Image (cartoon, rainbow, N blue to C red):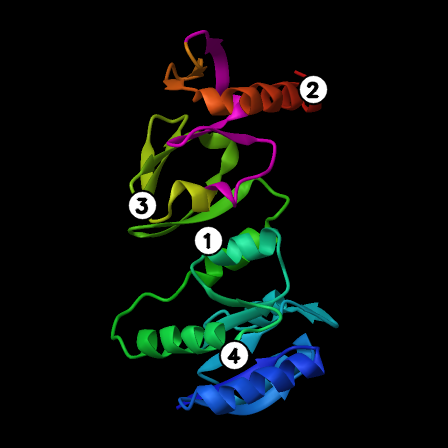
Amino acid sequence: MLKTIIIDDENRAVQTLQIILSEYCPQVSVVNKAYSAPEGIKLISLHKPDLIFLDIEMPNGTGFDVLEAFPNRTFDVIFVTAYNNYALKAIKFSAADYILKPVDIEEVVESVKRISERRNQPGNTHPDINGLLHNIKNLYQKKISVPTFNGTEYISTDEILYFEADRSYCKIFFAQKRNILISRSLSALEQLLPTGNFVKIHKSHIVNLAAVKKILRTDGGIVELTDGTQLLIAKTKKENFLASMQRYIKENKL
């Protein structure tokens, strides 16, 4: 049985979720409910659950505050949220489980099933919750956390020249003549990058506007970066790229 706590400030949401778990998820045992972040922290310390259903926006703190109170987490998390912005994108990027409000029975069942199967697999890698917390915390800072095959790397976006799709993975190329392969797709990574600094110029490439040195005229155009790399601009991306470049120059007074 998965010893479970529901943490959400909406009483109706808590009741609905508890009914769904009771009727459709026999592997779950709800041991308690909390209606605020501080209350949730207390109950987790008391019950040491296997799983928590966690709302993000609550009184006196957020769901992320709850997670930060437990740096050595042994429980799994399913986010239950109405978010449709950066926070949700960061949750997706970290490969964490989430359910959008209003909750759907099938989504709850599927999320619980994934958690149960993962917990029964020895040595299985859990979602990168620490990376998620870092990215949320640094929302307005120029650093992102990305999963690599050796662990997690914290990257200053100023050092990045461009990103390149590599099937379901992505390569990051740096000004220091190095690159790393990360276990996320280009489209997933695009959601996480600071708006206005990075632009997709092709289905295979996202460039750092700060690294653009020249635009060469061809059919669609070619971007030349500060290290001499030349990348094709797709015809369908050219107008957006040029507009983004002009905005970047104006905002940064270049």
Q: Amino acid at mark 3?
A: Ser
User: Residue 168 shows which numbered tag?
Assistant: 3
- The span shown in magenta is 190-218
- Nearest to N terminus: mark 3 or mark 1: 1
Q: Amino acid at mark 1?
A: Phe
Residue 132, image x, y percentages: 50, 57
On screen, 209 above or below 152?
A: above
- Nearest to N terminus: mark 1 or mark 4: 4
**Which of the two residues, 191 or 210, is positioned nearer the viewer here?**
191
- Nearest to N terminus: mark 2 or mark 1: 1
Using residue 138 as the reference point, say whether residue 118 is left or right of it. Answer: left
For the image shown, how many numbered marks are present on the structure? 4
Task: Please report contact status of discs 2 and 1: CB closer than 8 Å, yes or no.
Answer: no
* Dot 3: element: loop
Q: Residue at x 61, y 43 (%)?
A: 141
Label 4: how many Cα within 10 Å (few below 14, some 14–19, many 20+): many
Q: Which residue is mark 4?
A: 52
Residue 61, image x, y percentages: 70, 69
Q: Amino acid at mark 4?
A: Ile
Q: Which residue is mark 2?
A: 250
Q: Residue at x 43, y 22 (%)?
A: 234
Is residue 1 located in the magenta-colored stretch of the structure? no
Report whether residue 128 is seen.
Answer: yes
The N terminus lies in which quarter of the figure?
A: bottom left
Task: Please report contact status of discs 4 and 2: CB closer than 8 Å, yes or no.
Answer: no
On screen, 2 above or below 99?
A: below
Q: Which residue is mark 1?
A: 93
Label 2: how many Cα within 10 Å (few below 14, some 14–19, many 20+): few
Using residue 196 as the reference point, say whether residue 72 is left or right of it. Answer: left
* Dot 2: element: helix
- Nearest to N terminus: mark 4 or mark 3: 4
